[in-house]
Amino acid sequence: MKVRLMHRDRDFDLEQDLPWNERALAQDLELDILFRAMSNKDEHLLDVARRAVLSGLQCDVDTILYRQEILKDCLKNPALVRGLYDLAVEAIESKRKSWYGYYSSYPGAILGGSIEVLRMFVDRLRKLRELAREQAGRFASEGWTALFAMLGKELTDEYLASVQHHLTALKLRKGVLLSAQLGEGGDGGAGYVLHQPPENGPNWLKRILGMGPPAYSFRLHERDEAGARILSELRTRGINLVANALAQSADHVLSFFEALRTELAFYVGCLNLRDRLAAKGEPLCFPAPEPGVTRAHRFNGLYDVCLTLHMEPRVVGNAVNAEGKSLAIITGPNQGGKSSFLRSIGVAQMMMQCGMFVAAESFAAEVRGGLFTHYVREEDATMKSGKLDEELGRMNDIVEHIVPNSMLLFNESFAATNEREGSEIARQIVCALLEKGMKIFFVTHLYDFAHGFLGRETGDTIFLRAERKTDGTRTFRLLEGDPLDTSHGEDLYTRIFAAGTEATDVRAPEDPERRSLLASR
């Protein structure tokens, strides 16, 4: 039995390789906040959320749309989806509680343990089948429809009754009926076959008169320990194949419940995230994925989902139409919302490509083969290399692992040297990446670099600038605008070092931009 709620043609592989830069993505985009919100303190949900989101970069448009339709059904029937997840967890936990015998090396113990586990599994399968029968009409997606149809076809009343009958018979209450062939040296060492005992034994009259079925028989003396041991060995050989087959059957059913739990975990995580965001009144939408050959990037009300999950107030969303653009250069004043905007771009791309909704009012973008981040890092405490060397080293690692049709997010990159040198390094790297069909979002204060792309004949560059009012107020919105030759650092100087009592109360937070990005829509 196959679940196939994540892929149309296969089950989700929880052990698949994750992107080479998974740690950098988690750090730069603050994905751990997203994963924790999806998990709701469930370790299995946390693991599945992390792996599903990070591996989503391998999904194509068809897989994304397939998962979106399944998720829409989940959002309409959250209680039922959570109930199915709990049922899968319950089945797995019941097996763990019945470990005795199941993990033994003795055929008799294996047989007994497997029977007990399968009996519990049959009860859960029957519940699953009943839920499928009762609730199938409430689901319209291809994935859910196929799953319910499979359960109805495979788990018929006749099949479940047959399984129950065989499990009862395998308890061997009437003893063991074996056949064997003589082995080498005349011992019974080959061809052991376990037979089903006759349903009806001799009637009461035959039993009284001793008229049983014709057969050679013997009885062991109660003190014949050697004979008892030999009979025990014969019984063990006879039930060995059946015990192993039953254990494999139990493993097969267990693997189905584990797959069901894993794939439902992704959608339960999406439900948990939806509940968190809905409680704050944050908008969500299902994005429109486009083939990678297009350059379709447009959105309205896009916000940093990790920021809003971390803080109480809502955060400002942005609207941009970058249709036909391969390069977005983002400039503007310090603490204007540029870094959070860049995070929102990266997180939205990952949420879209794994089949989730996106933290925006509307969102459309092309599917990319990979996502890479190049953010500013702390100074090397060991002083083994300078900051620019470290940045160039990370850029070299990205180039070695980059795949066609990737997206790159740069945040204040190559600013560890002077303006002229940093701008030239950034320009050469960006131009080379654009020639290879990459898409780039670049937050920078390097005016020479940003200004150098003005008037680019290809017309594939959009310039965004963090809005600043005349009095220095940041609105945390990104608007289209040419780069300016100032970052308005005097605003920060005035705010921090202004004379008066306010200056004595200033405390620099750990992440000034993050804390200042709060605003109501």
Image (cartoon, grey):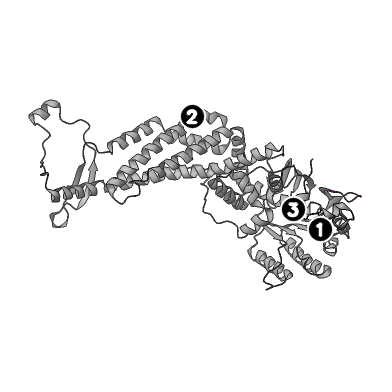
Badge 1 marks a residue whose secondary structure is: loop
Q: CA distance from mark 3 to mark 1?
A: 23 Å
Q: Residues within 10 Å of mark 1 (few under 14, many from 20)?
A: few
* Quadrant of the rendering where the C terminus is positioned: top right
Left or right of 409 in this view: 462: right
Q: Residues within 10 Å of mark 3 (few under 14, many from 20)?
A: many
Kindly identify the residue that appears in the image at 30 percent across and 35 percent down: 168
Badge 3 marks a residue whose secondary structure is: helix
View extreme (right): residue = 470
The amino acid sitting under disc 3 is: Leu
The residue wearing badge 2 is 133
Left or right of 5 in this view: 206: left
The percent position of residue 274, horizontal first and vertical second, equals: 65, 39
The percent position of residue 102, horizontal first and vertical second, equals: 35, 46
- Residue 289 is a magenta residue: no
Query: Foreground residue, 326 or 16?
Result: 16
Q: Which residues are magenta?
A: 470-474
Whichever of labels 3 and 2 marks the residue nearer the N terminus, that label is 2
The amino acid sitting under disc 1 is: Thr
* In this view, the mark in front (3 or 2): 3
The amino acid sitting under disc 2 is: Arg
The residue wearing badge 3 is 342
* In this view, the mark in front (3 or 1): 3
- Tell me whether circle 3 and circle 2 mark residues in contact (CB < 8 Å): no
Left or right of 85 in this view: 32: right
* Quadrant of the rendering where the N terminus is positioned: top left
